[in-house]
Image (cartoon, helix red, strand yellow):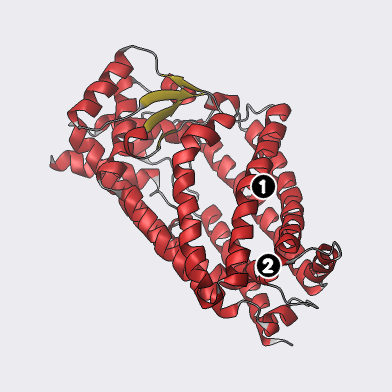
Amino acid sequence: MNSLLLFLLIVIAVGYTLELSVSLLNLRNLSPELPHEFNDVWDQQKYKHSQEYTRQNTRFAILQNTIATSITLVFLLAGGFNVIDLYARSFGYGEIITGLIFTAILLVLSLLLNLIFSIYSTFIIEERFGFNRTRPVTFALDTFKTIVLSTFIGGPLLALILWFFLSAGNLAWVYCWFGVFLVTIILQFLAPILILPLFNTFTPLEDGKLKESIVSYTNKEKFKIRGVFVMDGSRRSTKLNAFFTGFGRFKKIVFFDTLTEALTSQQILGVLAHEMGHYKHKHLIKMLIASFIQTGCMFFLLSLIINNAKLFDAFGMENISTYASLVFFGFLYSPVSLLISILVNYFSRKHEYEADNYAAVSTGNAQPLIDGLKILSSANLSNLTPHPFHVFLHYSHPPVLERIRALQTMKSVS
């Protein structure tokens, strides 16, 4: 057996086993006893409901991973990639256009599979637990818009990457590195202006006590914003959320309409102060630098294996191509990607604690944020007791219980 094929099979098997193990550990870690910190917001029935929500989602994720892994293995061992490559080549175009066709077919197949899972998750699981407000027509339009955006953004970007590797010689990976990162930065600026409004309506926050307290707080903290907006998140879900979007003077504060209905002005201010803490601590810049380094490492590693004959033999390919190298590299890169994501999540969780601390200090009171986190966790049926290994692998935010305990410790010290 081809040594690279054996390695690929081991990577897939280990990845599946790891996800299965951590999911089962997470289920076993569900505790029937409600943490006392939540007694003032949660009741036992709500807590049982949240645990059942975790069970349903975890079991569904296991099923989804099992089906996807099985299909991937069959597709790989049966020579599915070669069949698609031969079909893409049958049109007689050059390597860039052929690569776009090859990649598009693979993405369509992946989309169809994921669409089935997404429909079940949205209209069965989310509906069962009272979250779903997405109408079928909204779901269809969201899917269509996502496909169109991916085509008009991802297609030219892929063509550019292929062109670099076909014409730029040994420095191709460097051009790809800076080119992709530049596109990432541009999208960060364009998202709040052109992309997000395609999916949601953003309405300026109406005058009143909440807006006055926000303006007063942002002025005190010397934090310039373009505006405060309410997003119609209730069109799709009853879950609560808030976020900042944009860079520099184009920064905007966005609250889900569900959040403004569920939290008091002081609690919303606490959530806002937390988000502002990310900017004050330059977390976004730090993560962009990390992303820049990660992108460079990825393209450098890609340059080492591109058009590798043994790799193409492992995938049962009759022809060697730059575009297929990009796809196959994703399989080899998955262990590296996992290690990087663990490291990124570690720093992301650290950033969340720093943002919580900033919110408590800048507002002079940790309690509104604590209360807001409790209400958010209750409304979203959060898992209050995730397994530490699951947190280590996948959580970009600390578990809400740990965040609250950290805030309470700081509150008692102050």
Image check: 407 left or right of 207? Answer: left
At which x and y percent is residue 384?
44, 44
- Closer to the camera in the image, 280 or 6: 280
- Residue type at mark 2 is Tyr
Left or right placement of residue 188 versus residue 134 in this view: left
Q: Quadrant of residue 293?
A: bottom left
The answer, for residue 44, to whether it is visible in the render is no
Residue name at image x 36 percent, y 52 percent: 349
Structural crowding at the residue carrying mark 1, measured as other residues with C-alpha within 10 Å and reported as few (<14), some (14–19) or many (≥20): some
Marked residue nearer the N-terminal end (1 or 2): 1
Mark 2 residue element? helix
Residue at x 53%, y 59% (from the top left corner): 25
- Cα separation, mark 1 vs mark 2, equals 16 Å
Residue in the foreground of this view, choosing between 140 and 146 = 146
Residue placed under numbered mark 1 in the picture: 151
Q: Secondary structure at mark 1?
A: helix
Checking the image for residue 323, the label placed there is 2
